[in-house]
Amino acid sequence: MARNSPSTIVLITGANQGIGFGTSRKLAKENNGWQILMGSRNAENGEKAAAELKQEGLSVEPLTIDITDDQLIERAVKEVESKYGRIDVLINNAGIANEGRRPDWSTRQMFKELFDTNVFGHHIVTENFESLLAKSSHPRVIFVSSVLASIHSLVEKQREFANVPLPVYRSSKTALNMIMAYWANKHKVDGWKVNSICPGWIGTNLNEYQGQGTVESGTIHLATMATAGKDGLTGTFSDKEGPIPW
């Protein structure tokens, strides 16, 4: 572990593009002394993304981590433990939304692929980094979910995107919220702040750039939750407008 450890160490999965990249930039730029670990399943892409932000004078480092590969997850944990000894903030951001864009996949395969990344991967990453989060004086875990996860909004048709189909993607994000609730409950007495957030309908590679908002706008609520104090909320599901019904 380095002698001069950063004040806050943040790991963001899927950080080589989109919301993950934008959040890496925002947190590094606005929080002096923070070290951002930019997780990417492809080492070359991760190094290029980190190099771009380093040219801006930001404190970031690439970290190869494929959240669907247990060996790469374990390797990433060992690397972070060796260099830093802990992490303070884990942002489970990596995700896929291939529904409707992979005609070669059966419905069963679509469920397997999306749940492997959007649900299983985030739980396993959190599980593997749990011991390093426990070494922080202020652990924060954020799961990047979606308003489309809301069962209430779909049934009651109360939100803008209530009629959007995508049953596989929607159910994967609903399941992710349960994973969040599990971790929030497990470490509530320990003071961990664990929450799900929806960054908004942002145009990124995830949705073939069909969103309405910018990446910059999508990072605002994420950054707010990542920088929340010890008196912050836990076990919540929200976007920049406030709580989202389960």
Image (spheres, rainbow, N blue to C red):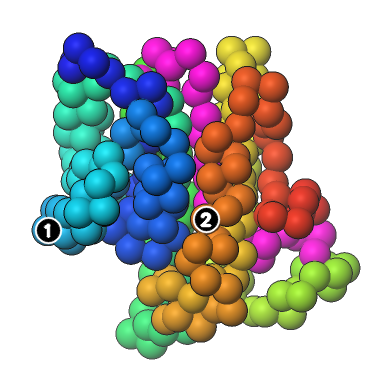
For the point 67% across and 79% down, which residue is it?
A: 164
Answer whether residue 117 is magenta in the image.
no
Residue 232 left/right relative to 98: right
Tell me the amino acid under the disc marked 1.
Glu
Answer whether residue 146 is magenta in the image.
yes
For the point 61% across and 56% down, which residue is it?
A: 198
For the point 45% across and 42% down, which residue is it?
A: 30
Label disc, if present, on residue 231 of the rendered structure:
none
Determine the residue located farthest toward the left in the rendered image: 44
Label disc, if present, on residue 44 of the rendered structure:
1
Residue 45 left/right relative to 95: left
Residue 236 left/right relative to 227: right
Q: Is residue 208 above or below residue 228?
A: below
Q: Quadrant of the N terminus?
A: top left
On the image, the x and y values in percent for residue 46 come to 20, 54
Residue for badge 2: 219
Q: How far apart are marks 1 and 2 (CA)?
A: 24 Å
User: What stretch of residues is rendered in magenta?
Assistant: 132-153
On the image, the x and y values in percent for residue 92 come to 44, 45
